[in-house]
Structure formats: structure tokens, C-alpha cells
Amino acid sequence: MPVSWWLKLAYHPMQVNAFLHSAILVTDLSRSERFYGEVLGLSRVDRNLRNPGAWYQVGAAQLHLILTAAYPDDRVDSERWGRNRHLALAVASLSAAKERLLDHGCPFQMSASGRPALFTEDPDGNIIELGEV
């Protein structure tokens, strides 16, 4: 009798060791670079690829911006941004992050849960959670 595929998995477990990167789509690379580099203050890292994009270091992981012609708007809840697909980044001071977003005219909404976090969006509508840690 053949061994089921799930039984084979038990004998060959996969071990995930780290989170490496997340990639998001953007339609205007220089506009996105201003947002992620200047507004959020992320550190850009070298990338040796021919396709247009930008990489940023965020702690031990990276955020990759991939240039695309059209951004797919797939929000399922336009009222509560945290109920949509999003990236979560830790900040030392939520009040400082909030002031920075206000200074740059970036929209945001406070977390509905009451915890020290807010949600903002990049120029293409990618939602980013900033949580105080």
C-alpha cells in the first residue's frame, strides 16, 4: 500500500529559520522611495537586479519594492485599514511616527483595538501598520 503524502511529510519535516523579506508592488518607484526612505526612514540596501525596484533593510529582514504598471486594489474593508492585507513595522515612539506622518501629509488611522498602533498607506495604497514596541 502506498504511503500517503502527509505521512511522508512527517519523516521529512521542513524547518523555517527566519523571515527574509516581503515584497510589495508600487507604480512609481521614485515616489515610493521618498515615502519609504524619507518619511518612514528605512535604510536602502544594494540590489543587483535588472528589473526596477528598491530594497530596504528592516531589522533582520528586508522590504522589497517591485515596480508594476498597475496596482491591484484588493481592500476588503475600506473603513478599518487593519482588517486588510498590511505590513507591520515596530516604532520606538508612536507619537513621533504620528507627527512625522502629519508633517508629510500622510493619511493614517489609529488602531481600533486601543493598543499603541496606527495604520497608514503608501502612495499606492499599500497599508502599513506602525506599532509602538
Image (spheres, rainbow, N blue to C red):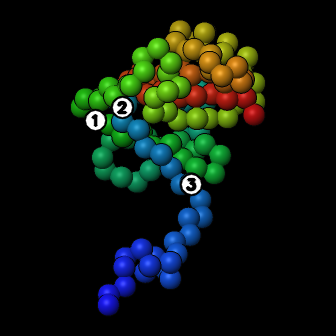
Q: Is residue 45 visible to the viewer in this orientation of the structure? A: no
**Any mark on residue 68, and which?**
1
Residue located 70% across and 19% down the image: 114
Question: 61 or 1: nearer the eye?
Answer: 1
Q: Position of residue 62 (x, y in %)?
A: 54, 47
Instruction: Sort mark 3 into few (<14), some (14-19) or many (20+) by Cα contacts within 10 Å.
Output: few
Q: Residue lying at the far bottom in this picture: please name it.
A: 1
Badge 2 or badge 3: first in the primary sequence? 3
Q: Position of residue 26 (x, y in %)?
A: 36, 31
Q: Residue 57 falls in which quadrant of the image?
A: top right
- Marks 1 and 2 in Cβ contact (< 8 Å): yes
Question: 76 or 131: nearer the eye?
Answer: 76
Identify the element where label 2 is drawn.
strand
Real-space Cα separation, disc 2 to disc 3, in angstroms: 21 Å
Query: What residue sits right under mark 3 in the picture?
Result: 19
Q: Is residue 54 visible to the viewer in this orientation of the structure? A: yes
Residue type at mark 2: give it. Answer: Val
Instruction: Sort mark 2 into few (<14), some (14-19) or many (20+) by Cα contacts within 10 Å.
Output: many
For marks 3 and 1, give the one nearer the viewer: 3
Left or right placement of residue 29 versus residue 100 in this view: left
Badge 3 or badge 1: first in the primary sequence? 3
Q: Residue lying at the far front in this picture: please name it.
A: 1
Question: 25 or 43: nearer the eye?
Answer: 25
Query: What residue sits right under mark 2 in the picture?
Result: 26
Residue located 73% across and 29% down the image: 132
Above or below, 111 against 67 in this view is: above
- Marks 3 and 1 in Cβ contact (< 8 Å): no
For marks 2 and 3, give the one nearer the viewer: 3
Identify the element where label 3 is drawn.
loop
Real-space Cα separation, disc 1 to disc 2, in angstroms: 6 Å
Residue type at mark 1: give it. Answer: Thr
